[in-house]
Amino acid sequence: MTTETTGVIKARVRLGDRVFSTSTIVAGSLILVVLAAVAVFLVVQSIPAIVAKPGTLPNAAPNFWAYVWPLVFGTVWAAAIALVISIPISIGVALFISHYAPRRLAQGLGYIIDLLAAVPSVVFGLWGVLVLARAIQPFFVWLNANFGWIPLFGGTVSGTGKTVLTVAIVLAVMVLPIMTAVCREVFLQTPRLHEEAALALGATRWEMIRTAVLPFGRPGIISASMLGLGRALGETLAVAMVLSPAVVINFFLLTSQNPNTIASNIALQFPEASGIGINTLIASGLVLFVITFIVNAIARFAINRRKAFSGAN
Amino acid sequence: MNVKRRIFTRASSIAAIAIAGTILLSSCAANEAAPTTSASSAPVSKLSGTLNGIGSSAQGAAETAWIAGFQQANPQVTVNYDPQGSGAGRTNFISGAADFAGSDAAMKDTELATVSPLCKAGTKAIDLPVYISPIAIAYNVAGLTDLKLDAATIAGIFKGTITKWSDPAIKSQNSGATLPDAAITVVHRSDDSGTTQNFTDYLSANAPTVWDKPAAQTYPYAVGDAAKGTSGVADAVKGAANSIAYIDESGATGLSIAQLKVGSAYVKINAAGAADVVAKSPVATGRGTNDLAIAIDRKNTDKNAWPMVLVSYLIVCNTYADAAKGELVKAYATYVASSEGQSAAATQAGSAPLSADLATKVATAIATIK
């Protein structure tokens, strides 16, 4: 009603407040500056490769996009298979910990899975190339002999087992801890009332999980998957050590000729690269940067869209 | 009583630490030098300073041996070598970030055009061949120990036109050997490498009808399994039955190595033959004085020659802008090319020591470093 300004009591500005708010602003903007600096570096260094004349690029590629396309495919392909393997497992493990296991066991198991996240990727790489690839190769031969009619398992089986499927398994193990941890936390937050209501209506435990826990946890599962995908897309050393790469685009899982991933390709070729080759590798890094950005954006979008229906409110 | 015991345990723990410390220190000392020999035989070096090198990973083990030997004789000097890769080495040398580079390829003409800020204006960088490594054809076939192959067959196997061990092309050269009727698993490098460059160079020179791609750092055909680095290739071959790979000889321990047809005879891999091929190869044309970039003669058919060989260079300025740095580099390069340095590399890294006449040529070039 009153139009004249009522005297707002101003809080006294103290030095401590000033210092603290300024330092948070600096910290907040620093991350933007770093991100911008990385982006600028990538773009500036990429330009010579993107405008390069045919014949100057590695792999005899006619232009940069032809060079990077198989790598983009390989990056997404390997990460996608890894997710197909790891999503059901991580949901299963998370549900076991949150709803099935006795409390003491659940806690121990949770610790062990978190511990898995602390294993450096080079160790996973060594395990992948020295243990898994050799051990799984006979299984690949069997798979190819019996299910070779499925295009995925067709082609000539790799003699060393260093295939995209082996890589995907290693990646799946690597992303499992983070995905399990997120899923577990979300499942544990399912409102007790929802669960009890489901049980009271005569649901079995599985039906209770299906009707109460999983719908509530869906955004959590999606964000867990995206976190996992982010790690799988950018994983470098383990892929470089395990994969037998070639410049191809195919969907075969068991052959020697596998599409390489962007990060692994950079790791493999950078030491001996010179001139335009370096620009090309940096430009492919820019492409990876964009891909991970898109993945994150999709994840955000999915989570925000689903929030309203999740039952969290 | 109690107090006494506590003191006792403390004393004993101090003693334990002291003993452990002594052992540690003495083992360090043992690592560094045998002071008696170096003090008596050579006057104590007056050189001091730090040298930073970046480059070829193939040279890595040899550089470690050279640095250990050189620092023993010159305790005031620190030499660092970062085996990032040949390309990285040359790039960093040109930009001035490294005092010298190790590289599996000589400087390209375009690279020579830019003079490192470390070099005196108007002078050029020079390539010194200091590391020779025979490349082996290593294989893992149960029951097969003396495989013999000629260039065309190797090219066929690595191009993917010969796919079985029982192929007539292999059989005809290995009468009496038991060759399995199994598919050949070819293993090659997944990273760009000087080994691939020299291997493909050998094949394109000796079997041009089969190997129709030029020499390249990147493996040119979509054949076989790829593995990272020499150790990765060795592991892959060890782990996969009926596999074959090209690999630096030093990395092939534990694997069978094929004999190579040179001229009309089959030759076993040997360091002397590899060094001999390099020594008899002409110096690349169009190079400045003292630049010893070598155009390896892949068609050398001398007795016991091994033309499937990799040469790695030490790349330095001929004249450094900083005279003290020049003196250091000269001393280091002299040691590297000396028979002492070469035999250290041979024991530590499995390289082939330079032959006497090439060593003399290299020493003459090194003498001009300022």
Image: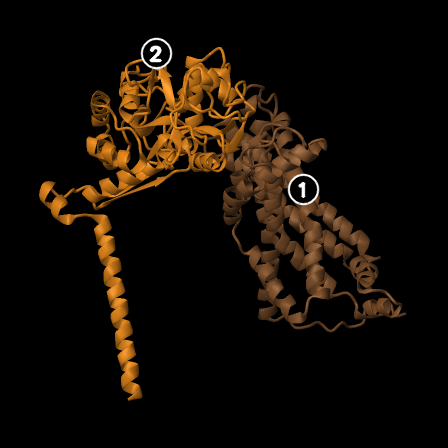
Query: Which residue is at 30% across, 16% downward?
Result: B281
Subunit of mark 1? Answer: A
Query: Which residue is at 55% across, 38% downward?
Result: A264
- Image height of A266 relative to A9, above or below: above
Chain B palette colour: orange
Q: Residue A35 in the image: x percent, y percent?
A: 60, 46
Q: Which mark is residue B264?
A: 2
Subunit of mark 2? Answer: B
The image quadrant of residue B55 is top left
Query: Which residue is at 28% across, 32% downward?
Result: B321
Mark 1–mark 2 distance (CA, rounded to whole Å) = 52 Å
Query: Which residue is at 29% across, 77% downward?
Result: B10
Q: Nearer the viewer, mark 1 or mark 2?
A: 2
Left/right placement of residue B358 relative to residue A235 reads left
How has the structure been colored for display?
by chain
Q: How many marks?
A: 2
Q: Nearer the viewer, residue B141 or A63?
A: B141
- The residue that mark 1 highlights is A81
Looking at the colours in the rendered structure, which chain would you say is drawn in brown?
Answer: A
Label 2: element kind: loop
Label 1: element kind: helix
Quadrant occupied by the C terminus of chain B: top left
Q: Residue B104 in the image: x percent, y percent?
A: 38, 28
Q: Is mark 1 in CB contact (under 8 Å) with mark 2?
A: no
Q: Residue B365 in the image: x percent, y percent?
A: 24, 24
Residue type at the position of mark 2? Ser
Left/right placement of residue B98 relative to residue A2 reads left
Q: Residues within 10 Å of mark 2 (few under 14, many from 20)?
A: few
